[in-house]
Amino acid sequence: MRRAPKFGVFLAAGAAVGILLALILTFAFDGSAFVSPNTGVEYSTGQVFGFLLLVCIPVFLAIAAAVALVFDRRSRRRTHEVVIDHESVHDEHGAD
């Protein structure tokens, strides 16, 4: 018997942190006010947010997955066996 982490919860938390960081970076450093030196185009705030989402979400998904794997490995060390018996009790008198 062991308590394994739920990977979906970790991945959802990683995605949420990635979205939050992208939102903070979008408005903390107003990159939409300047023309890009690489492309010569001025990007809107929504485009900057989208570009940051494309970077932040996969990075934090990977970090969250790595943390979940570490917790999973730790839980395997504490594994112990448990014997469980299933019993059925039937009332012969039909009383509730």
Image (cartoon, rainbow, N blue to C red):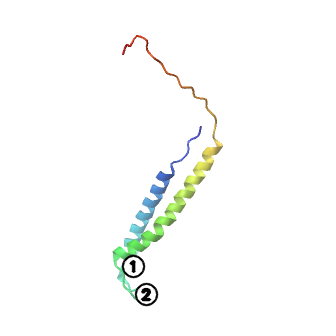
Does residue 8 appear left or right of residue 69 in this picture? left
- Pick the front one: 10 or 21: 10
| Disc 1, SS | helix
Give residue 40's mark.
Answer: none
Q: Is residue 63 above or below residue 31?
A: above
How far across and down, in percent of the image, does residue 58 sit? 49, 65
How far across and down, in percent of the image, does residue 95 sit? 37, 13
Q: Earlier in the sequence, mark 2 or mark 1?
A: 1
Q: Is residue 63 above or below residue 95?
A: below
How far across and down, in percent of the image, does residue 82 sit? 61, 32
> Counting other residues with Cα less than 10 Å from the Cα at mark 1, is it few (<14), some (14-19), or many (20 or more)?
some
Residue receiving disc 1: 31
Tell me the quarter of the image containing the C terminus: top left
> Counting other residues with Cα less than 10 Å from the Cα at mark 2, is it few (<14), some (14-19), or many (20 or more)?
few
How far across and down, in percent of the image, does residue 28 sit? 39, 72
Residue at 57% across, 57% down: 66
Q: Is residue 63 above or below residue 2?
A: below
| Disc 2, SS | loop
Amino acid type at circle 1 is Gly
Report the residue that reaches farthest toward the right.
77
Report the residue that reaches farthest toward the top.
93
Disc tally is 2
Amino acid type at circle 2 is Thr
Residue at 47% across, 59% down: 14
Q: Are marks 2 and 1 in contact (CB under 8 Å)?
A: no
Residue receiving disc 2: 39
Residue at 59% across, 37% down: 1
